[in-house]
Image (spheres, rainbow, N blue to C red):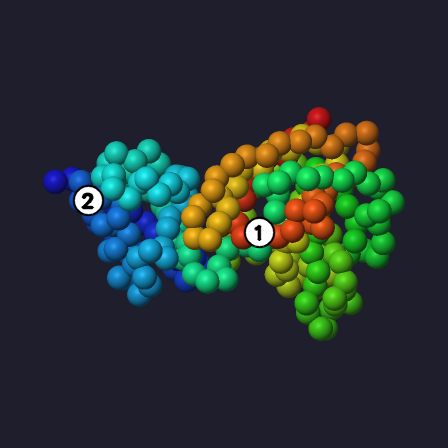
Amino acid sequence: MVLWTIYVVKYDGDGVMEFNVDNEKTFEEFRKIVSKECNVCCKDLIFMGQLEYDCEYNSKKLKEIIGIGDQCTLFAVYKVNGGGISTVDISKNQTNEYEPSKIRGPSYRIGCDGLVIQSNCKNRNCEAFNDTVYIQIGYVQNWSLFEHLEDKVKCPACGDMVKPLNYWFKNCSYEISFIKDVDGNYERGTIKGTANYGKYKTFNREESGEAIFVKLVFNVTRS
Ligand SMILES: [Zn+2]
């Protein structure tokens, strides 16, 4: 028996838990141990971090899964009703192009090259209350969004956390890997595109609608 130390970051950011676990145990068994500790139903708990979650892991032994090892850190994600990031359904990759004048306005609505996140501020005390705001992200490598770890997306006017509604790109090549929650099943995929000629490219929310994503990973490079 080989004991591994596995650290689990709780999804709400409420500390890191340490588990000493036999690496012959299956992923499912490990999930049950963590679920018990977190007091949530096992089927509602998945992990991410160095590994990309896959349902096929459940029956595998920990030592057989690439991305899990001694001293590794995993992020616990609770799969509950209404969980995940509700955002434009990027998996359809329906895009529109706009002249830069489309994304200009007050100081909280200024774009940039690379990635820009579109949102709407819900803070009543904010000058941008109920208004569209743009969060400048720029060029990024392996920049990820998880539910409850999206504090990277803050209103540029007041600093409150805001919900990412859409994504704009300019002067870049972009690649987004996603895990989409389709009625409790996880669909994984990657979409790619380029936004050149000084125009902004964004997803067409009217055509694509919204979907629930467990995770989004952005790679946005200068083109
Ligand atoms: Zn605000």
Q: Is residue 10 above or below residue 194?
A: below
Q: Which residue is mark 1?
A: 211
Write the residue at 82% across / 41% down.
98
Residue 145 x %, y %: 54, 48
Q: CA distance from mark 2 to mark 1?
A: 34 Å
Residue 92 at x, y percent in the picture: 62, 40
What's the residue at 77%, 46% (across, down)? 111
Q: Is residue 65 visible?
A: yes
Question: On the image, which quarter does residue 14 sit in?
Answer: bottom left
Q: Which of the numbered marks, if any, corresponds to residue 25?
A: 2
Task: Give the position of the N terminus as an image quadrant.
Answer: top left
Q: Is residue 32 left or right of residue 146?
A: left
Please say if 49 is above or below 14. Answer: above
> Which residue type does callout 2 highlight?
Lys
Query: What quarter of the picture does the C terminus occupy?
Result: top right
Q: Identify the mark nearer the N-term, 2 or 1.
A: 2
In the figure, is residue 189 to the left or right of 36? right
